[in-house]
Image (cartoon, helix red, strand yellow):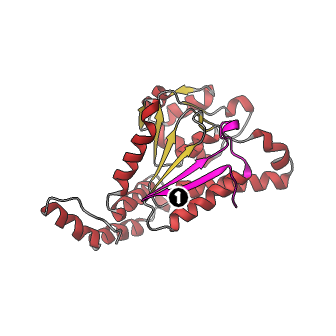
Amino acid sequence: MTTDKMLSRKEGKIGYLTFNNPERLNAVSLDMWEAASSYLEDFKNDKNIRVVVVTGAGGKAFVSGADISKFEKERSSQEGIDRYNAAVDHANHAFYSFPKPTIAMIRGYCIGGGVGLALCCDMRICTEGSKFGVPAAKLGLGYRYDGLKKLVDLVGPSFAKEIFYTARQFTAAEAQMMGLVNRVLPDGELESYVQNYAETIAGNAPLTVDSVKFIVEQALTDESKRDLKTCEDMVQACFASKDYTEGRRAFMEKRKPVFTGS
């Protein structure tokens, strides 16, 4: 699935995925969700890509939720509703289970499904003028367990309830105070900061970084479903890797290590 409403590019070891519907504040339609999953699969299979940055086009919004203008066409029948929900679920799972680090680069509105998408990323970095909110209670919408659990895991139950009960928009400062975002930056510094941040991560040992991501996610999983064997296998793979040898040598030789992910 391809659409000009989703853009993908690669710069060195960093993949960029852009929601490109600025005239509707990057509201997401069915074809955009389907294309996002396809692009993520490409990044996943590209061994040169070590970090993915997710953002929105136009400078006014990250993602403002679902594209309501498409509902009559895409969600007016049960078949359409089922297809749309399946595409959203598949995309959110693709983001959340993506094995490499992901960064949500947020400028402007991050509303509804935009918050859900940001929660599926490992880190969220935004501008001072960004706004966050989930207006489900103003629309009579239900919210599924998986989405709410991600929010509770990140900000705790009290703030999660406040976000949903009030359905209001929160400032970037409030979002950072709650733990919803990692960093808040002046508008003109966002891209350069995120690029440098992503390059720092991409320069570290991929096996270590990817294993930490997997193990942290397992720690947030119900205890009965945790894959502790894979956790241990990934740790042992780090110690058995060429990168571990390279890291030790680089430290002794006082130089920057060159990691290959092997």
Taking the image as shown, residue 87 lies to the left or right of residue 117, namely right
Magenta-span inclusion, residue 26:
yes
What amino acid type should be assigned to the residue bearing mark 1?
Ser
Magenta-span inclusion, residue 260:
no
Taking the image as shown, residue 141 lies to the left or right of residue 259, namely right
Which residue is located at x 68 percent, y 57 percent? Answer: 34
Q: Secondary structure at mark 1?
A: loop
Q: Could you say where residue 48 lies in the image, as x and y percent from the top left?
A: 43, 65
Residue range (magenta):
1-30
Q: Could you say where residue 247 lies in the image, as x and y percent from the top left?
A: 22, 64
Q: Which quadrant of the rendered structure holds the N terminus?
A: bottom right
Q: Could you say where residue 157 lies in the image, as x and y percent from the top left?
A: 51, 36
The residue wearing badge 1 is: 97
Q: Which quadrant of the rendered structure holds the C terminus?
A: bottom left
Nearest the camera: 193 or 216?
193
Taking the image as shown, residue 139 lies to the left or right of residue 90, namely right
Which residue is located at x 52 percent, y 58 percent? Answer: 97
Which residue is located at x 28 percent, y 64 percent? Answer: 258
User: In which image quadrant can residue 234 be found?
Assistant: bottom left
